[in-house]
Image (cartoon, rainbow, N blue to C red):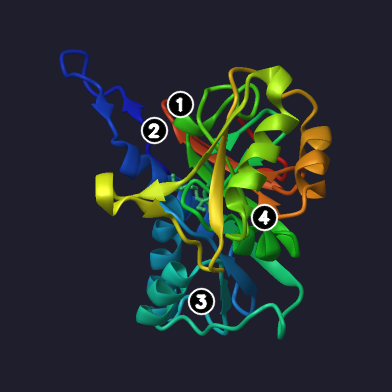
């Protein structure tokens, strides 16, 4: 029951092209089909996950879902869920979740992800690592052959103490690959300051020129550096990826679907 991005109508009419936001919404609504009453749910962060959280709130209001408990992955999502009347809890009270729904910045063919360009990677990874099902929702622009190969960032959450030192060590880890490490900032000129996460940490973005090699090796090396809290590669965590794109929506089976 989902539209395709390009819907042939009559021969003389141009095809209907959906916007990126419409695609995100379609993927999000499809993911919410996985939600059942009584579930403990991880609530993701970002422009795509927002559509899913809105939809869960709507179904609760309509009485079509009951007894949902949400575990938000950021302060922003917490605010959104509270405004929608979604009952919330935390990992201390619910260390195992039935399902989480979240967006991603990149998805490869093995369902590995880059997340955290919105800055919420640590809480997202804590929540999504203890879900029985982790449903990822993306539009087709997020699909890549290799994580990090598009030149966009792989975010690393670091503690503020001597962040330049940690930034340098991160860059040195991958210097043979021409990696550049750069603190994420907000504002410009005199107003430029570090982006601060919900956990009062900073983010160092890693920029690669091409393939970053074995993802597990890269992950281990990053996590061994003192000063690093977590990185934005979510390896072997997604159970389903729902991709909304030109050919419609994929994501009906377990382990989907690109
Ligand atoms: C936030 C995230 C987001 O899920 C990711 O950035 C995708 O966001 P969007 O749906 O807005 O493209 O990881 O930390």
- Return the disc, 4 or 2, that comes first in the chain's sequence: 2
Name the quadrant containing residue 221: top right
- Whether residues under marks 3 and 2 lie with C-beta atoms below 8 angstroms apart, the answer is no
Query: On the rendered structure, is 225 left or right of 42?
Result: right
- Return the disc, 1 or 2, that comes first in the chain's sequence: 2
Quarter of the picture containing the N terminus is: top left
Q: Give the alpha-carbon distance from disc 1 to disc 4, as whole Å.
A: 23 Å
Kindly state the secondary structure of the residue where label 1 is placed: loop
Q: Residues within 10 Å of mark 1 (few under 14, many from 20)?
A: few
Q: Residue at x 64, y 40 (%)?
A: 113
Q: Residue at x 49, y 46 (%)?
A: 117
Q: Give the alpha-carbon distance from disc 3 to disc 2, as whole Å.
A: 27 Å
User: What residue does disc 2 label?
Assistant: 4
The CB of the residue at mark 3 lies under 8 Å from ligand 1: no
Q: Nearer the viewer, mark 3 or mark 4?
A: 4
Q: Give the alpha-carbon distance from disc 4 to disc 2, as whole Å.
A: 24 Å
- Return the disc, 3 or 4, that comes first in the chain's sequence: 3
Q: Which mark is residue 247?
A: 1
Residue 40 in sight from this viewpoint: yes
Q: Position of residue 253 (x, y in %)?
A: 68, 43
Q: Residue at x 27, y 53 (%)?
A: 191
User: What residue does disc 3 label?
Assistant: 65
Quarter of the picture containing the C terminus is: top right
- Whether residues under marks 1 and 2 lie with C-beta atoms below 8 angstroms apart, the answer is yes
User: What residue does disc 4 label?
Assistant: 134
């Amino acid at each position: 029951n989902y539209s395709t991005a390009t819907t042939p109508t009559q021969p003389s009419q141009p095809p209907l092209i959906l916007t990126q936001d419409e695609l995100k919404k379609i993927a999000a609504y499809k993911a919410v089909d996985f939600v059942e009453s009584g579930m403990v749910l991880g609530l993701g962060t970002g422009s795509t996950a927002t559509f899913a959280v809105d939809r869960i709130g709507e179904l609760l209001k309509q009485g079509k879902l009951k007894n949902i408990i949400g575990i938000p992955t950021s302060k922003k999502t917490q605010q959104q869920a509270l405004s929608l009347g979604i009952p919330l809890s935390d990992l201390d009270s619910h260390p195992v979740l039935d399902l989480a729904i979240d967006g991603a910045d990149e998805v490869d063919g093995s369902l590995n992800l880059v997340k955290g360009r919105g800055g919420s990677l640590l809480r997202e990874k804590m929540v999504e690592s203890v879900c029985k099902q982790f449903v990822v929702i993306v539009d087709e622009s997020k699909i890549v052959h290799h994580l990090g190969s598009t030149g966009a960032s792989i975010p690393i959450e670091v503690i503020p103490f001597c962040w330049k030192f940690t930034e340098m060590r991160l860059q040195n880890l991958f210097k043979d690959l021409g990696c550049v490490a750069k603190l994420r900032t907000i504002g410009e000129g005199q107003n430029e300051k570090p982006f601060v996460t919900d956990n009062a940490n900073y983010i160092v973005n890693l920029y690669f020129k091409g393939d970053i090699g074995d993802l597990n090796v890269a992950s281990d090396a990053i996590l061994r550096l003192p000063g690093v809290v977590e990185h934005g590669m979510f390896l072997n965590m997604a159970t389903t990826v729902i991709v909304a794109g030109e050919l419609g929506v994929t994501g009906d089976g377990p382990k989907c679907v690109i």
